[in-house]
Image (cartoon, grey):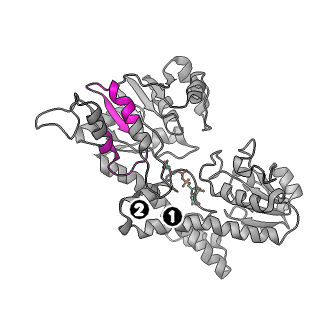
Amino acid sequence: LSVTVMGLGYIGLPTAAIIARTGAMVTGVDVTPSVVETINSGRVHIEEVDLDGLVSGVVARGSLKASLTVAPADVFVIAVPTPFTEDRQPDITFVLDAARAIAPVLKTGDTVILESTSPVGTTEQVRDLIARERPDLKLPGATRPGEQADLAIAYCPERVLPGRILVELIDNDRVIGGITPRCARKALAFYRRFVRGACVTTTARAAEMTKLTENAFRDVNIAFANELSLVADTLGVDVWEVIRLANRHPRVNILSPGPGVGGHCIAVDPWFLVAADPANTPLIRTAREVNDGKTDHIIARAAAMIEAQDGPVACLGLAFKANIDDFRESPALKVAAALAARFGERVHIVEPYAATLPRAFDGTGARLIDIDTALETCEAMIVLVDHDIFRSVPLNERRGKTVLDTRGLWPDQS
Ligand code: SAJ
């Protein structure tokens, strides 16, 4: 079996490497020459647990290679970004570009699978684009009665959690939506090669909406926790204790408040549902606004705390969540950068997952220090990320400090 994976990012590269491990010949295609070079030399350009060893192994065996150009294959997996525009509309340009790039090499019997998070109807748009580029092929959903389509086209969203990608790629259940039921079955046979979880088939449109729904569900639930944290502050009650106690109810399961919601999925995907039906999505839209508003609230509270102090203040963490080195759309980074812009060299940053400070801090005078130095030199601390290394600091090392704990990391801090 030969497989081409379009896009070698956080999803595409681990997926390509896992498929290569099953013995398939995999070509990963990316538009960035340095990414292609790095992978072909057996190295990785992203941090993910165990990914480096897996990639170096399959590259050395010759089962994975990276390329700037698309060659013929039996299965094409599209895993490119789907960002949203300034006015919160989904931008599927990269998906359509990838479809255009594979169209010339498609042949009868091939399977095309879209994995990128996409607005409902995108897989049909991919089909329509291929139909225009390749009028010689009979496409699914556009055949005459009794005729077989030449290609299978399906949507199968990734649902892996950064930091656990290689495990979840194999263990999670997969939703596989075909343009036709036959397309779904063909794609299912492919995923069965490496997925241990259940593979459930449906239509492409239902699968597209399912992916958006999963992330909107989480966003709405985090918004509930963030809203509660504001109410608890107003009332002078410890929100973490309230949540812990409420969660003892058998049908209540409240998530954790924080400095806002980051990453490139949960902070983005709900907007795809809102864009599809603005009139009927007040809850999903409000949840987004509550979560973004929480970041501004923390900036204001942190600024007030710094103003009431002298001396340096430590911001603990920049990543968008615990124990990863991914700073994309990170509320922690947004808070720390806003404070650095205002308070300059008084702002000290602790981020064990960064070798240097990101660009957002250029010219601010803010410094990157380690946790030991922070504990020795900073009397005020703002906890922005619940990295294990911060959690492990015992009370006697932080007793008496002024702490703004946005993650409920140190419940024993008075
Ligand atoms: N967060 C909270 N409180 C919580 C949980 C999370 O504030 O109780 C924050 C995190 O700190 C982070 C953000 O939300 O800033 C998102 O983190 P996450 O761990 O909830 O999710 P992601 O973005 O790492 O991955 C999500 C996952 N989706 C769901 O859990 C429904 C993952 O399974 C998806 O594959 C991924 O989005 C994706 O690529 O769509």
x, y percent for residue 199:
35, 42
Residue 165 visible to the viewer = yes
Is residue 350 positioned above or below 9 on the image? below
Q: Quadrant of ligand 1?
A: bottom right
Is label 2 in a helix, a strand or a loop? helix
What amino acid does circle 1 point to? Arg
Quadrant location, the C terminus? bottom right
Q: Nearer the viewer, residue 387 or 145?
A: 145
Quarter of the image for residue 152 reads: top left
x, y percent for residue 404:
74, 66
Reading the image, the residue beneath label 2 is 274
Query: Which of disc 1 and disc 2 is earlier in sequence?
Result: 2
Query: Viewed as shown, does residue 401 lie left or right of 186?
Result: right
As drawn, the residue found furthest toward the bottom would be 235
Q: CA distance from mark 2 to mark 1?
A: 10 Å
Tell me the magenta residue range: 98-126
Reading the image, the residue beneath label 1 is 288
